[in-house]
Image (cartoon, rainbow, N blue to C red):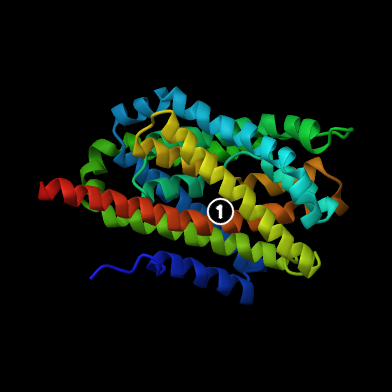
Amino acid sequence: MSRPRFLPDNFTLALLSVVTLASLLPASGQVAHFFEGLTTVAIGLLFFLHGAKLSREAIVNGLMHWRLHLLVFGSTFVLFPVLGLALKPFLLPLVTPQLYTGVLYLCVLPATVQSAIAFTAMARGNMPAAICSASASTLLGVFITPVLVNLVVLPDGGHATSSLDSIGRILLQLMVPFAAGHLLRPVIGKWIQRRAAVLKFVDQGSILLVVYTAFSAAVIEGLWRQVPAHALVGLLVVCAVVLGLALSLTTLLARKLGFDTEDEITIVFCGSKKSLASGIPMAKVLFASHAVGAIVLPLMLFHQMQLMVCAVLAQRYARRGRETSLLKTAE
């Protein structure tokens, strides 16, 4: 008997449990450092396994899929800022001016890498294109985000700088394990393909670790104390509206432009996300220290919301893929 459509799946229940655990028992001090290290290892393993799984032809095809990459970059660095500015009459009354500045800031950030790729893998999307697109978005964001902060977030003045250190960290954490796995593909590729459950465990496990570490940090930083209750509720509404529009518009554009389902999955999951890992360090550089807390709060809430919503979407895409396979087998 199949699971009723509106009941949450096991992975969504696991996500809710992790969020609850982080709210009640957030990791701090040495424990937080341990989980951060564990998350780094899990993400590196994720990229290593996907590097071993993907063929050279698939990677080349991913790199050459310029129409997909252009749509993802347009969503990340054009669509989001336009939404943030166009919705100002609706968004600003729901939150404080500082929180609205934070909403604009989240709109100019690059896409997240780890969860976008993991969700694409779970949903059976175009993995080579997802790896190329999400990684390139983060690399370009190091340069593009400070410019957009001056143009969109601080149009009346201000100064923005960024560091190239993040590029080195991205290359070391993501692309080096991926390249190592790909180089070892002739040795371990067939073994990996026969054990798809290993990839699924790493995909889902890395997301759960990211949720716990990110939400723990948010709770410790005073997530539930920094704003009045009514402003927090308004901020949740604002984040839901921005995320809902981003998911809907990327899905609509992918279908209108004739992309297949695998490409649509990649566009939706890479084009609708914003990076907490890049956003918080950048905020400490781009804004005055006393303003950082309120400015990153929308990002922290949006980050948790996108993980929860996209987990459900990924499961739905994956089920649709399995149903299609069963229909083809029956025929």
In the image, taking residue 111 as reference, residue 189 lies left or right, namely left
Image quadrant assignment for residue 221? bottom right
Horizontal arrangement in the rendering, residue 290 relative to residue 255 (left or right): right
In the drawing, does residue 90 fall left or right of residue 318?
right
As drawn, the residue found furthest toward the left would be 331
Q: Residue at x 42, y 35 (%)?
A: 255
Please state which amino acid type lies under the numbered disc 1. Answer: Gln
Percent from the top left, x then y, of residue 78? 64, 31
The residue where tag 1 is placed is 306
Horizontal arrangement in the rendering, residue 97 relative to residue 140 (left or right): right
Secondary structure beneath dot 1 equals helix
- Tell me if residue 170 comes above or below residue 4 in the rendering: above
On the question of residue 112 being in view, the answer is no
Tell how many labels: 1
Q: Which residue is nearer to you in this view: 81 or 63?
A: 81
Q: Position of residue 248 (x, y in %)?
A: 52, 44
x, y (%) of residue 89?
78, 45
